[in-house]
Image: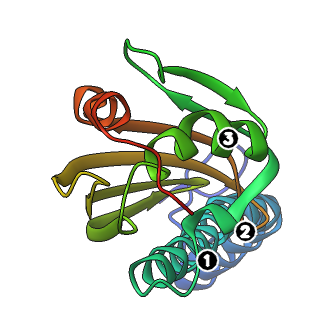
Amino acid sequence: MQHGIGAAVAPGPILQKLKEVIMKQALHTLLLPVVAASHLFAAAPVLAASDAAATETSNTAVVRGAFDAWAAQTGSVFDILSEDVAWTIPGSGPVAGTYIGRQSFLEDASLPLVNRLATPIVPEVHHIWAVEDRVIIRFDGTATTTSGAPYENQFVWIFRMEDGVVVEAEAFLDLIAYQNVVENNELRAD
């Protein structure tokens, strides 16, 4: 083994340990802020997912409660509509279109049917799904018309919720069944 300038020196155990400590300290000093920041950024999606889950749970409870009240005839699902709801019925036929405002929807789309029913529509909910601010309800509705005939329809409603109320709705249903009731039944006499 040579000694002096330019001579190769094999690292001893003390020198090796010192090198490891320096490397760990350098990594710790350089990487700690990066690791800490990555945890902060990684927590953001978790918090967002947590907020979305809470919104979904809350919206589902509001909608389920409204449908339960409607089925029990102690309330109406329309109680959870905002006053300025945009309610769209896709398709073709006299009732298809977009109704702006709760009152417009009730008067122009709901009452022409409901006023020709001898019994209230009773919903049977098959499923409620919630994704972020959207709630999707698949249900059947049955009633008896003023002529005594059964009214049966299948529905898929998609709600966009804000602060526990429906601000937008799309209602998919059999428009022919709806129109048959409107055209073939007298208005209720009450």
Marks 1 & 3, CB-CB < 8 Å contact: no
Marks 2 & 3, CB-CB < 8 Å contact: no
Q: Count neighbours of disc 3 (C-alpha within 10 A) and say few if under 14, some if 14 to 19, many if 20 or more.
A: few
Q: Is residue 79 left or right of residue 113?
A: right
Query: Can residue 43 be seen?
Result: no
Type of amino acid under label 2: Gly
What separation in Å lies between label 1 and label 3 (alpha carbons)? Answer: 29 Å
Query: Can residue 123 be seen?
Result: yes
Q: Nearer the viewer, mark 2 or mark 3?
A: 3
Q: In which quadrant of the rendered view does residue 185 lie?
A: top left
Q: Position of residue 184 (x, y in %)?
A: 27, 33
Residue depicted at x 46% and y 46%? 187
Residue depicted at x 79% and y 65%? 163
Look at the image and name its color scheme. Answer: rainbow
Q: Nearer the viewer, mark 2 or mark 1?
A: 2
Report which residue position mark 1 lands on: 58
Report which residue position mark 2 lands on: 164
Which numbered disc, 2 or 3, marks the residue that appears first in the sequence? Answer: 3
Which numbered disc, 1 or 3, marks the residue that appears first in the sequence? Answer: 1
Type of amino acid under label 3: Glu
**Camera-nearest residue between 100 and 145:** 145
Residue 107: assigned label: 3
Q: Nearer the viewer, mark 1 or mark 3?
A: 3
Residue depicted at x 47% and y 76%? 70
Q: Is residue 104 above or below residue 135?
A: above
Q: Position of residue 51 (x, y in %)?
A: 67, 69
**Camera-nearest residue between 20 and 176:** 176
Which numbered disc, 2 or 1, marks the residue that appears first in the sequence? Answer: 1
Q: Position of residue 32 (x, y in %)?
A: 77, 68
Circle 1: element type: helix
Type of amino acid under label 1: Ser
